Amino acid sequence: MIRVPLDVALERNRQRRADAIVPEASIRTVASLFEPPTVEEGFSRVRIVEA
């Protein structure tokens, strides 16, 4: 998993080509609902990379 702060994700999204920009509301919604994976879910290992 790559963990990116919301403000960084929003800024990167603003820098995308016009036809590749994701609506900001969608990014905020996903960020608020996202739960990191856990080994209890069956993953053999969870590695978190801070970006």
Image (tube, rainbow, N blue to C red):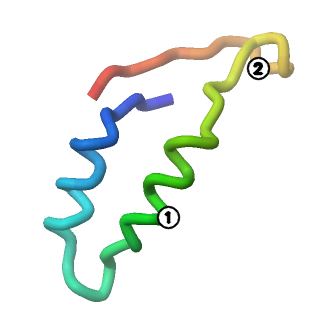
Residue 29 lies, in percent from the top left, at: 54, 54
Q: Which residue is mark 2?
A: 43
Q: Is residue 36 left or right of residue 6?
A: right
In front of the other: 14 or 19: 14
First along the sequence among labels 2 and 1: 1
Would you place residue 11 above or below residue 1 in this image?
below
**Label 2 vs label 1, nearer the camera:** 1
Dot 1: within a 10 Å radius of its alpha carbon, few (fewer than 14), some, or many (20 or more) residues? few
Above or below: residue 17 compared with residue 36:
below
Residue 46 placement (x, y as % from top left): 61, 15
Mark 2 crowd level (few <14, some 14–19, many ≥20, 10 Å Cα): few
Q: Look at 31% across and 33% down and name the residue there.
A: 5
Disc 2 secondary structure class: loop
Residue 10 falls left or right of residue 23: left
Quarter where residue 19 is shown: bottom left
Residue depicted at 14% across the width and 66% down the height = 15
Q: Amino acid at mark 2?
A: Phe
Question: Furthest-bottom residue in view?
Answer: 19
Query: Split into 4 quadrants, where in the image is the C terminus?
Result: top left
Residue at screen point 31% across, 75% down: 21
Q: Position of residue 26 (x, y in %)?
A: 49, 64
Picture residue at 20% right of the left edge, 79% below the top:
17
- Residue type highlighted by circle 1: Ser
Mark number displayed over residue 26:
1
Count of numbered marks? 2
Indicate the quadrant where residue 11 lies: bottom left
Image coordinates for residue 27, horizontal then vertical, percent: 44, 57
Question: In the displayed structure, would residue 23 be above or below residue 30?
Answer: below
